Amino acid sequence: MKLLLDECIDRRLAREFVGCEVKTVPQMGWAGVKNGQLLALAGADFDVFITVDRNLSFEQNLQQFNIAVIVLQAPSNRLADLKPLAPKVLAILSEVAIGQAVNISA
């Protein structure tokens, strides 16, 4: 499973997704790219886009993109707040559907 972490997520969170190939938006050279274009780019190379942007599913028609979206809902985007959500992300990876967003919270 290929995962892309949004640029607002600490890159060290990638270590929690054992068994997955994980890249960050900046690693891909896509820092600053707007959400619609970012999802289009990501859909060509990744299975799942992980973000903390709760508005993404309201701002974009996710069905037009070839990627699933996981929205992490935590008190902040600090690593300490996001790390406990990683096991839940791993548990649902096989269930996420392309063109849809899934919210994960504590």
Image (tube, rainbow, N blue to C red):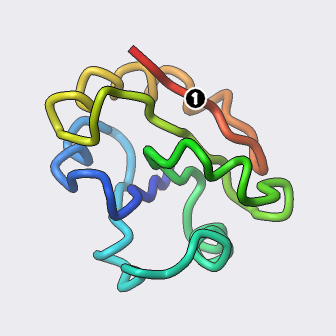
Percent position of residue 29, x then y: 36, 85
Q: Name the residue at the bottom extreme.
A: 29
Residue type of the residue flagged with mark 1: Asn
The picture quadrant where one finds residue 13 is top left
Q: Identify the image quadrant of the C terminus.
A: top left
Residue 20 placed where, x, y %?
A: 38, 46
Image location of residue 50, percent across then percent down: 47, 48
Identity of the residue drawn at 62% across and 52% down = 56
Q: Is residue 52 above or below residue 27?
A: above
Q: Which residue is mark 1?
A: 103
Q: Dot 1, crowdedness within 10 Å: few (<14), some or many (≥20)?
A: some
Residue found 68% across the figure and 40% down from its top? 101
Residue sticking out furthest to the top: 106
- Quarter-of-image position of residue 92: top right
Q: Is residue 99 left or right of residue 50?
A: right
Residue 63 falls left or right of residue 31: right
